[in-house]
Each structure stands twice: as C-alpha cells, then as structure tokens.
Image (spheres, grey):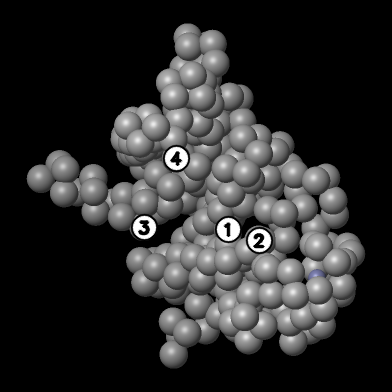
C-alpha cells in the first residue's frame, strides 16, 4: 500500500517533470500557462492530466485535434514512479529518501533535456545545487559531518573539468556542473563510483552506437545522460557495489 502511494506520487511528479523537460529548453515558464496540447494549444482538462491513465483512456491522442501524444510522456511518468519506489525500498522512511527522490527528479530533467538538445541548462544544475546545499545545511543543523559531500563535489566537478581541459571538447562544462552537483548529493566514495560507472556506460554505449552505425566517431554524443544513469545506479545500488567489490 505504501509503495502504491509512493508510486502515485512519483507519476504525478513525473508529469510535472515532463513539463520541465519540454519547456525549459524553450525558455518558457514551467508554471504558466497551464498544460495544453503542444499541437492545437487546446487546454487540457483536469481529467486529462491524470498521469499514464489519461494517455491510455485517450489512446495516446489529443482530445481536440486527435494529434498523437508522444509515448515518452507516460513513460517518463512511469519511470519516475518506479524510481521513487526503488529509492523508498532502499532508504525507507528517512531524510535520505526525500533527498534522493528530489535528486532523481532533477536528474531525469537534466538527462532528458541533454538527450533532446545536447545542452545542460544552468537553471537545472543550479536547482540541484540549491537542493543539495539545503540538505547539507540540515546535516549541519543535526550535527552530522558535511565535509565528505564537499569532497564529493570537488572530485566530481574537478575530474570532469580536468578532462575538458585536456581533451578540449567532447564533454562540456555542463557535464562538470552535473558531476559537481551529484558529488554534493552522493559524497566522496559514491561519487568516485558514479564517475567510474558513467565512463564505463559512456564507452559501452558510444562503441555500440558506432558499431550499429548510428553514429560515427565524429558525431557528438551528449555525456550528461550517462552521468544521470550512473548516478541513479549509484543511489540505488552504489553501496552494494562497493561492498561487493571490496570483499
Ligand atoms: Zn491538440
């Protein structure tokens, strides 16, 4: 029952994340105007805004103009719901759960926008930074150490900055921003794992894309989505991977 509540919360937030993913690159407000069909501008009624369900009931089409609605919208809602449940299973009723579901939400927006536009928007990383700092302030208030997270941020942002300076291209400063924010959430050890995983995932997918002739060596493949996937894996299974590796 509690899982269902968390899942429903996830798909509702997921529906808001869709709005962010669609509007932030267009420099539109994420709050106004209310949701509308992107094709005919028809205003969506409240019963059209039920995550996933509305999509199924309307058979993936707009109520007014019958234009197809991308399957991506319900998929992102579903993904957000599932990730919220997984974070809750992992961390239970703790502050960590709240921290990580917010982090996952921000990462979904950053990753999807990077996939769509190959851009990382400062607004999104800044939001992550503010959230992470807020949780660190809570740590300080509760008398918990924070230095580990600051080291995480330095190693995350620092490693990427170094790569950017050495390779002069490939990765962008937006990627360094993402890693430094993730470091602030994850702390030192988990950030190292996240960096490691993002390079592994990046090379495997990069090589696969070249092998499948979807991309050539000269094409630009955004690195942000790999950082996002690596961070989510680290949130969910990072501690287990480290324990398993060290044993
Ligand atoms: Zn329409």
Q: What residue is pinned by disc 4?
A: 226
Residue underneath mark 1: 105
**Contact, mark 4 vs mark 1 (Cβ under 8 Å):** no
Residue 10 shows in the view: yes
Q: Quadrant of ligand 1?
A: bottom right
In the picture, the quarter occupied by the C terminus is top left
Marks 3 and 1, how far apart in space?
14 Å
| Mark 1 secondary-structure assignment | helix
**Does residue 67 sit above or below 220 in this rendering?**
below
Of the image marks 2 and 3, the number of the one nearer the N terminus: 2
**Mark 3 falls on what kind of element?**
helix
First in residue order: circle 4 vs circle 1: 1
Label 2 – label 3 distance at C-alpha: 20 Å
**On-image quarter of the N terminus:** bottom left
Which residue bears the numbered disc 3?
Answer: 236
* Residue 76 x, y percent position in the rendering: 56, 63
- Left of 232 or right of it: where is 69? right
- 221 or 152: nearer the viewer: 221
Q: Is residue 84 visible?
A: no
User: Who comes first in sequence, dot 4 or dot 2?
Assistant: 2
Residue at mark 1 to residue at mark 2: CA–CA distance: 7 Å
Q: Which residue is mark 2?
A: 17
**In front: mark 4 or mark 1?**
4
Q: Quick one: label 3 or label 1, which is nearer the N terminus?
A: 1
In the rendered view, would you say 185 is above or below 163? below
* Percent position of residue 115, x then y: 57, 43
């Amino acid at each position: 029952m509690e899982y269902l509540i968390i899942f429903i919360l996830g798909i509702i937030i997921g529906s808001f994340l869709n709005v962010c993913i669609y509007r932030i690159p267009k420099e539109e407000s994420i709050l106004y105007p209310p949701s509308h069909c992107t094709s005919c501008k028809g205003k969506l009624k409240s019963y059209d805004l039920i995550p996933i369900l509305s999509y199924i009931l309307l058979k993936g089409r707009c109520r007014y103009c019958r234009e197809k609605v991308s399957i991506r919208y319900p998929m992102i809602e579903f993904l957000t719901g599932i990730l919220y449940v997984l974070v809750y299973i992992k961390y239970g009723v703790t502050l960590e759960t709240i921290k990580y579901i917010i982090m996952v939400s921000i990462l979904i927006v950053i990753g999807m926008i990077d996939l769509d536009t190959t851009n990382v928007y400062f607004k999104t990383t800044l939001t992550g930074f503010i959230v992470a700092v807020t949780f660190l302030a809570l740590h300080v208030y509760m008398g918990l150490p924070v230095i580990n997270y600051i080291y995480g941020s330095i190693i995350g942002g620092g490693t990427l900055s170094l790569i950017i300076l050495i390779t002069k291209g490939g990765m962008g400063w937006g990627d360094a921003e993402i890693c430094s924010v993730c470091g602030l959430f994850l702390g030192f050890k988990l950030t190292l794992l996240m960096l490691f995983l993002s390079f592994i995932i990046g090379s495997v997918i990069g090589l696969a894309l070249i092998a499948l002739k979807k991309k050539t060596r000269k094409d630009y493949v955004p690195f942000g989505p790999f950082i996002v996937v690596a961070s989510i894996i680290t949130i969910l299974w990072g501690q287990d991977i480290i324990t398993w590796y060290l044993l």
